[in-house]
Amino acid sequence: MEEQDRTLITNLAWGSIEVTIGTQVLQFRDCKVWPGGARTWDWGETGTGHSPGVQPADIAEVLEKGIELLVLGRGVLNRLEVQPATEALLTARGVEVYIADTKQAVEHYNNMVQKGRRVGGVFHTTC
């Protein structure tokens, strides 16, 4: 993976996540990331809430980036649910999935990026 495509999460705090792409540093509350890009994850776009949780529409954009692994951060307190249809979509597309509380998810995401995997992520930074 080219250095300019390396998207790392460089800081995580309650309600804040910092993403570094090459020399560019971005700040978000919740975010979607992929090789070479990131943007805010606005729950209002798809009507997402803690329940029913992450929907297929929430991950569609990241899946379009040609990832082989999607990491889902369910919040610091692990309160964000993941719909079964979301996991089914990933399985159908042959994309590996890792779901955990956001701290563990960020650690796994960064580790996989450092190993050269094509990783995407969707991260919630509060509850």
Image (tube, rainbow, N blue to C red):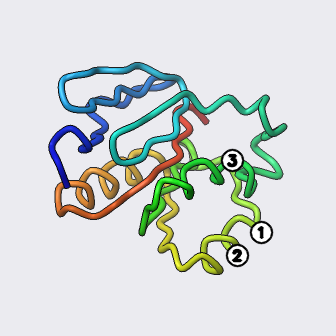
Which residue: 49% across, 58% down? 100
Name which residue type carries label 1.
Ala
Which residue was labeled with disc 2? 88
Q: CA distance from mark 3 to mark 1?
A: 11 Å
Name which residue type carries label 3.
Asp
Q: Nearer the viewer, residue 38 or 64?
A: 64
Tell me where residue 84 appears, x and y as whole percent: 75, 70
Q: Quadrant of residue 127?
A: top right
Which residue: 82% across, 52% down? 52
Would you place residue 58 above or below residue 39 in this image? below
* Pointers 2 and 1 in contact (C-beta within 8 Å): yes
Q: Secondary structure at mark 3?
A: helix
Which residue was labeled with disc 1? 85
- Counting residues from the start of the chain, the first of labels 3 and 1 encountered is 3
Q: Secondary structure at mark 1?
A: helix
Q: CA distance from mark 2 to mark 1?
A: 5 Å
Horizontal arrangement in the rendering, residue 57 relative to residue 41 (left or right): right
Q: Secondary structure at mark 2?
A: helix
Would you place residue 85 above or below residue 59 in this image? below
Horizontal arrangement in the rendering, residue 52 relative to residue 117 (left or right): right
Which residue was labeled with disc 3? 58
Tell me where residue 101 appears, x and y as whole percent: 49, 51
- Counting residues from the start of the chain, the first of labels 2 and 3 encountered is 3
**Quadrant where the image shows the N terminus:** bottom left
Residue 104 is marked as: none
Name which residue type carries label 2.
Ala
